[in-house]
Amino acid sequence: TDAGLTLEERDARLLAIKNVSALPIKHKGLRNLGDLNKYKEWSDDFYLDVLCGGTPCQSYSNAGLRSGLDDPRGQLMLAFGGVAAKYRPRWLVWENVPGVLSSNGGRDFAELLGLLTGQQVSVPAGGWKNSGVLAGIAAAYGVAWRVLDAQYAGLAQRRACVPCRLSWRLATCRSGIF
């Protein structure tokens, strides 16, 4: 098995992922914009109020090779940030595994934070903590993150995750948001 899936389940999952690109461009008011890596080519004729997603975790997982941004899957984290920079939704929610905080000595997470907060971000002495808040410049996002156990959000397994809540022009974030 692969990630707890049988070979049939894995094949069905891969087929479903492949078929996403075949979905209609517009369906019941929802748009399929296609490949996240091609966000710069997407149309500008719409507004995003909320951008929510979780990019692949394999590049950051402690169970994987920890290639971080050197892995194309890891670079999707920055593509997500690029979508936010292009469309400027009021709210963002992004999720990944706790290993994202320490990948490449914490520099990968710092790069995402810098992209979203509009400033140069350095890894703090001792690395990123399990929760934190970082205010952005006036024309950027403020960010709050916290390592949570997904079993307390209804998932039927213990799974640590790092949801990040980001607010446009949020001068201050309160750490009690999670």
Image (tube, rainbow, N blue to C red):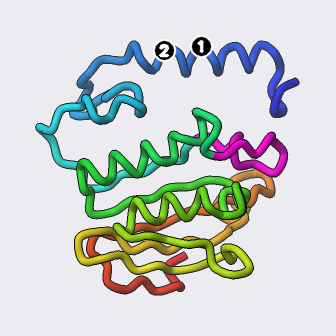
Q: Are discs 2 and 1 less than 8 Å apart at CB?
A: yes
Most common SS among magenta residues = loop
In the displayed structure image, the side of residue 82 where residue 133 appears, left or right: right
Name the residue carrying label 2: 19
Tell me the residue at 28%/35% (across/down). 40
SS type, badge 1: helix
Quarter the N terminus occupies: top right
Magenta-drawn stretch contains 49: no
Residue found at the far left of this picture: 45
- Near mark 2 (Cα within 10 A), the count class, few <14, some 14-19 or many ≥20, is few
In the displayed structure image, the side of residue 150 where residue 64 appears, left or right: right
Q: What stretch is highlighted in magenta?
A: 56-68
Would you place residue 130 above or below residue 8 in this image?
Answer: below
Quarter the C terminus occupies: bottom right
> Which three-letter amino acid code belongs to the residue tagged 2?
Asn
Q: Which mark is residue 25?
A: none
Tell me the residue at 66%/73% (across/down). 128
Residue 106: x and y, percent? Answer: 66, 64
Name the residue carrying label 1: 15
